[in-house]
Image (cartoon, helix red, strand yellow):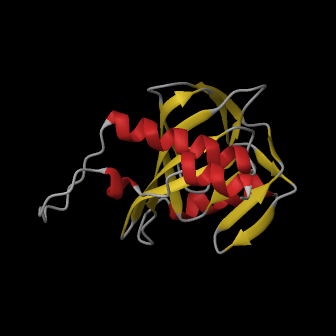
Amino acid sequence: MDLDREIQRIFLREESLDDLAPRAKDTHPARHWSRAVIMERIAYLKEMARFGNGLAAETVREAPGHAAMLLLRTRTGEAELHDKHADYYIVQSGAATLITGGRIENARDTGPGETRGDAIDGGRRQQLGPGDVAYVPAGVPHQFELTGDATISYFMIKIELQEEDSSRNSQLKMRDKATGA
């Protein structure tokens, strides 16, 4: 039997958070996931990141205007910028440096309103650890930096910027400055 498939079969249950949460015939829209369920999902994501590029993510919930995800990183990610989304990060475990602002080096468009690059030049560095919460507005470059064997797991809540948002123009100006446009 293929070793990778056997590892996935034994260790990496492919269930969503909703599959693990207790179910009853409740039609209430609110959901709850216990700390034990979250930590079990983080262990799953750690194994997935180990087999991939150092990042594993699971969408917890999507709804109009926002999405919630659980992510785990085992290495430094690309610099990124979103024109129409703000990100909230709620650290669950581990540690990393969040770099914000500055200019994205070797910036490239990766989709509508999405920019990625190699690194951030001139950004502000903030150490993050368990329990910390960080906010990155739309139009602001950001990147997670990890060193050595460090890992970080976090909830990310992505909020879609409304077109009528009065700060939209200033955010687009920040984006142009950040990507050298």
Tally of marks: 0
Residue 140, can we see it?
no
Horizontally, residue 117 falls left or right of residue 42, namely right
Which residue corresponds to the image point at 42% horizontal and 68% vertical from the top-left? Answer: 162
Q: Nearer the viewer, residue 17 or 85?
A: 17
Which residue corresponds to the image point at 73% horizontal and 69% vertical from the top-left? Answer: 110
Query: How far from the left and from the top, in percent, is residue 54?
Result: 72, 45
> Is the residue 29 above or below the residue 78 in the image?
below
Q: Nearer the viewer, residue 15 or 159?
A: 15
Identify the image quadrant of the N terminus.
bottom right
Residue furthest to the right in view is 106
Residue furthest to the bottom in view is 112
Q: Quadrant of residue 36?
A: top left
Residue furthest to the front in view is 1
Q: Nearer the viewer, residue 80 or 179?
A: 80
Query: How far from the left and from the top, in percent, is residue 32?
Result: 25, 47
Horizontally, residue 54 falls left or right of residue 68, namely right
Q: Quadrant of residue 124?
A: top right
Query: How far from the left and from the top, in percent, is residue 161?
Result: 46, 64
Query: How far from the left and from the top, in percent, is residue 98?
Result: 64, 35
Residue 84, can we see it?
yes
Identify the image quadrant of the C terminus.
bottom right
Q: Quadrant of residue 76?
A: top right
Horizontally, residue 49 falls left or right of residue 165, namely right
Which residue corresponds to the image point at 54% horizontal and 65% vertical from the top-left? Answer: 84
